[in-house]
Amino acid sequence: MKVLLLGDRFITNDIFQDALLRRFEGSGIAFEFSAHQLLWPVAPMESNDEVAEYSGTDDEIIPFLGDAEAVLTHTGCFTRRAIASAPALRAIALGRGGPVNVNVAACSERNIPVIYAPGRNSNAVAEFTAGMIMAQSRGIPQSHHCLRHERRWRGDLYANEMAGSELSSSTVGLVGFGAVGGKVAKIMSRGFGSRILVFDPYIPSEVAAKYPDYTFTDLDSLLAESDYVSLHAKATKETAGMIGAREIGLMKCNAILVNTARPQLVDYAALYSALKDGRLRGAALDVFEDEPPSESSMLYSLENVTATSHLGGASLQAAEIGAARAADGLYTFMAEGRMPEFVFNKDLKG
């Protein structure tokens, strides 16, 4: 089988190849590999009118597609043009949670399954979220920056009006209770003893009943009662801008907003205004309306923000899990002749 390894600087070609060889061991299928490595995350992702969150361009990858029968990738740009350039292509396997970088409709027209890896970084993002909550609450990044880069001792952060709250005495509100939100709830409740509020209109009552220690409520009540509001909803038409000026106005003035999910969930202009005016104590942000933020972003003038460069899913295990799930799906399709569980275009002809 001719396979193109189209990794990047997170899920490298070596990781993809190792996962594929382990999964196909004993299958009798031999591989002929070609490879090209993309630059993400060192180079930012790009988007166009056809696909989103990709690395490189279709011009970059087309010369490597050739007669590949299968592609393993993470962020490769698969436009209709790229897919048309690969006449032998039978499957695309992604090591990420959604195929936003692939023109799925064009694949369906060719009967090419688009395999993906949902939940591959849910542990990584959940643990990162807990770290962001603690960091912003207790002034860790502010103290580190001043001591390390300005040689300035921040004794004022110990003052009563600046000290943070212990998580065991706090209420954490989770907007979204999917793979990440559910794990954050477990970490915060069992690990720190936090009270957990959940807003997720897609969780049936019988599922919510399985979590008697959590309180499932409406969004306005969650915002009003929470000391920390952490966003874990998907980016959809319904959730776009769901945290705007009105919603921020419902939050406690000493509350902290955490977004390790998607920038589309937040009206960042309204958030930055509230942070500047002191209507919110702080925010911990891993995603932004522009990535990287523009030079003119108000973000750079705010001291009450912990900001990171979209690192939530960056763990060694997330890369390995993504590659393994892509290899699993490819094995099911190529070696067993069955449609894998995680195929985005499930309506293929067969």
Image: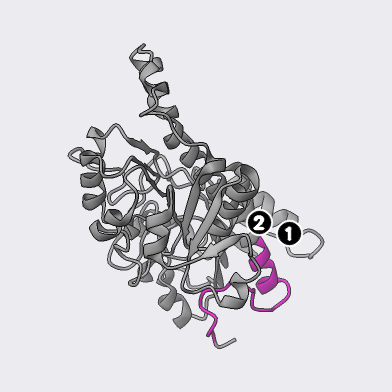
Q: Is residue 117 above or below residue 276?
A: below
Q: Which residue is mark 2?
A: 324
| Residue at 48%, 57% in the rendered image | 174
Q: Between 133 and 341, which is closer to the camera in this rendering? A: 133
| Residue farthest top in this picture | 151
Q: Which residue is mark 1?
A: 23
Q: Which residues are magenta?
A: 327-348
| Residue at 36%, 61% in the rendered image | 52
User: Is mark 1 in CB contact (under 8 Å) with mark 2?
Assistant: yes
User: Which image quadrant for residue 323?
Assistant: bottom right
In the image, residue 190 lies at what x, y percent?
A: 65, 48
- Main structural element of the magenta stretch: helix, strand or loop? loop
**Closer to viewer: mark 1 or mark 2:** 2
Secondary structure at badge 1 equals: helix
In the image, residue 225 lies at what x, y percent?
A: 42, 55
Asked whether residue 31 is drawn in magenta, I would say: no
- Can residue 178 be spotted in the picture? no
Secondary structure at badge 2 equals: helix
Cα separation between marks 1 and 2: 8 Å
Which of the marked residues, 1 or 2, is nearer the chain's N terminus?
A: 1
Asked whether residue 328 is drawn in magenta, I would say: yes
In the image, residue 235 lies at what x, y percent?
A: 38, 64
In the image, residue 221 lies at what x, y percent?
A: 40, 62
